[in-house]
Image (cartoon, grey):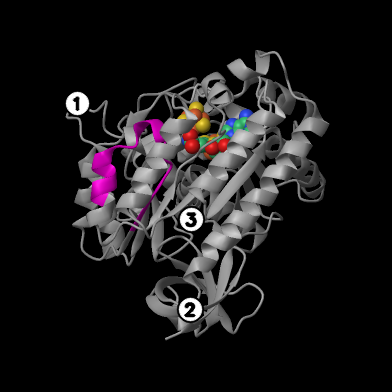
Amino acid sequence: MYNEIDLSTIEAGQDPPLQEPERQYYFMAKCRRYVKAESERLGRVLTAAVITFGCQMNARDSEKLSGILESAGYELTDNEEADFVIYNTCTVRDNANQKVYGRLGHINSLKKKNPHMKVALCGCMMQEQSVIEKIQKSYRFVDLIFGTHNIFKFAELLANMYEAEGMIVDIWQDTDRIVEELPSQRKYAFKSGINIMFGCNNFCSYCIVPYVRGRERSREPEDILQEIRRLAADGVVEIMLLGQNVNSYGKNLKNPISFARLLQECEKIEGIQRIRFMTSHPKDLSDELIQVMKESSKICRHLHLPLQSGSTRILEAMNRRYTKEQYLALADRIRREIPDISITTDIIVGFPGETPEDVDETIDVVKKVAYDNAFTFIYSKRTGTPAAAMEGQVRDEVVKEGFDRLLKVVQDTARERVARLEGQTMDALVEEVNEQDPDFLTGRLSNNTIVHFRGDKSLIGTIVPVCLKECHGFYYIGEMQ
Ligand code: SAH
Ligand code: SF4
Ligand code: F3S
C-alpha cells in the first residue's frame, strides 16, 4: 500500500540513511538484489511463507512482514516448504508455544533437504529469555530471531541475515518508537486491521502480554486517520481498530483524545462502511463510548468485553479492577442503550485459588449477560507473572470439571441468543467462498455472526442483504435477498 517509493532508484553503495522509514526502504532495495541473485542462480522465483499465531495484532504485524517480503522480491505462499519461512509467534498460553516447537521440528527436516532455506522467528514468544536460550541450544538451524519492538527493522535484519553466517538474534527490551509508513500486504482486499495503540499497562496478574509487548503507546490520531483514508481509497470498506485496551486510547498523548472521539473521526471517512474494534477492558468503557456507538451508523453492533471471571474475589486476584456487580451493571447499560448489540467475552477457568463456587459465579454472569459467544480458556501458568507464584494452583481434574460445566452453559446460552434473529433479513459483508461448498459464500453480519448463503464470488467485498433462514448454533444458513 505504501509502495510509492521506487526501490530501484536506491543506490546500494551509499551508506544506509539514519532516518526511519527511509532506512528500511534502503534495506528492502538491498534485499531485492540478494533475492534476485539467488533467484537467477536457482532459475526460479523465491517463495516466502509467513505463519501467524495469536491475536489480531499479530495478524496485522504479519501483513507488514508480508509487505516487506514482497517488496524484497519474494512470492508469498502459505506452504511451509518455502525458501524463507517466518513464524510470528504468540506466548499468551503455553499451548501456543508448544505449537511453535512442533512446527520447528518439522522445519528442521525440511531444511536438511533444502539447505538454502532460511528460517526466522519473531513475535511475543521471542521476548522471553528462556525461549531464546532454548532455541539457541536445541534449534540451531534458525537463521534470524527478533522480537515485537523492532519488527519495523525486518528489512534491515533480513539484509543482515543474507550477509552473515549463523544465527542473528536481535531482541529489544522495550521501545517508545512507532515507525509508520512501511509496506503492508493485506490478507483481505476489502477489510483491514489498524493498530491504534501498542502494548499494555494493565498487568492482569495471569497475563504475559505487558511483559512481551511493552508499555502502552497510542499512535497520533492524524496518523491513524491518514492510514484509514488511504485504505478507503484502496477499496477497504471495513476497518478494525486494534489495541489491547482500546478504551484507554489517547490518554497519554501530548494532546489527549478519547477513544470515542477517535471513532467519531473515523466515521467521517468516506468509503468506510463498517468500523470494529478490539479489545475493550470493562474498567475503562465509558458512557461516552456507548453513546457514540448508539448514534453511529458505521460502528458494528458488536462488543467484545472480556469477563475473565464472574467471581469478585478472583477478579481482585486477577487485578482486573472491577467487581461482578460492576460488570453486570455495565452490560445492562450497554444492552439498554443498544438493544440489538451482540456481546462476546473471554473467560479463564482454573486461576489459582478458584473454587467450584467461583465457577458458579462465572456461570451466573454468562446466563445474565447472555453472550453471543464466549472464548473459554484453561488458565496457563506464565513464568514471571504474579499469578505464577500464587498459592492454590488448581488441580487438572478440578479445572476440567469447571471448564466442562461452564462450556455447556456458554454453548446453550449462545445458541439461544444467536437464534433470536432467525427469519430476519440483515446486511452481510461477503468475505470469502465457503470452505466446504464452493457454491456458497461466507459473510459476516454487523454483530459479527457468520452466515453462509448461495452466491457468486464476484460479490466478495460487498455488503448484501441476507435472510437468516436457519440458525446452526454459532452461524446461520441464509438466502440472499
Ligand atoms: N487485552 C485483552 C486480551 C488479550 S489476551 C483483554 O484484556 O481483554 C486474550 C485472552 O487470553 C484474554 O482475554 C484471556 O482470557 C486469555 N489469557 C490471557 N492470559 C492467559 C493465561 N495465562 N491463561 C489462560 N488464558 C489467558
Ligand atoms: Fe493482558 Fe490484561 Fe493487558 Fe489484556 S488488559 S493484555 S488481559 S494484561
Ligand atoms: Fe499472543 Fe502476543 Fe497477541 S502473546 S495474544 S500474539 S499480543
Identify residue type, mark 3. Answer: Glu
Structural crowding at the residue carrying mark 2, measured as other residues with C-alpha within 10 Å and reported as few (<14), some (14–19) or many (≥20): some
Left or right of 387 in this view: 333 = left
Identify residue type, mark 1. Answer: Lys
Which label sits in the foreground, 2 or 3? 2
Q: Residue at x 67, y 75 (%)?
A: 436
Which label sits in the foreground, 3 or 1? 1
Disc 1 element: loop
Which label sits in the foreground, 2 or 1? 2
Q: Nearer the viewer, residue 280 or 431?
A: 280
Q: In the image, is residue 319 part of the stretch drawn in magenta? A: no
Structural crowding at the residue carrying mark 3, measured as other residues with C-alpha within 10 Å and reported as few (<14), some (14–19) or many (≥20): some
Vertical position of residue 477 compared to residue 389: above or below: below
Identify residue type, mark 2. Answer: Gly
Q: Which residue is mark 1?
A: 254
Q: Nearer the viewer, residue 378 or 250?
A: 378
Q: Which residue is mark 2?
A: 423
Ligand 1 lies in quarter: top right
In the rendering, at what x and y percent does residue 178 appear?
34, 33
Q: Which mark is residue 70?
A: 3
Question: Quadrant location of the N terminus?
Answer: bottom left
In the rendering, at what x and y percent does residue 94 appear?
70, 33
Left or right of 214 in this view: 164 = right
Disc 3 element: helix
In the image, which residues are magenta?
275-292
Structural crowding at the residue carrying mark 1, measured as other residues with C-alpha within 10 Å and reported as few (<14), some (14–19) or many (≥20): few
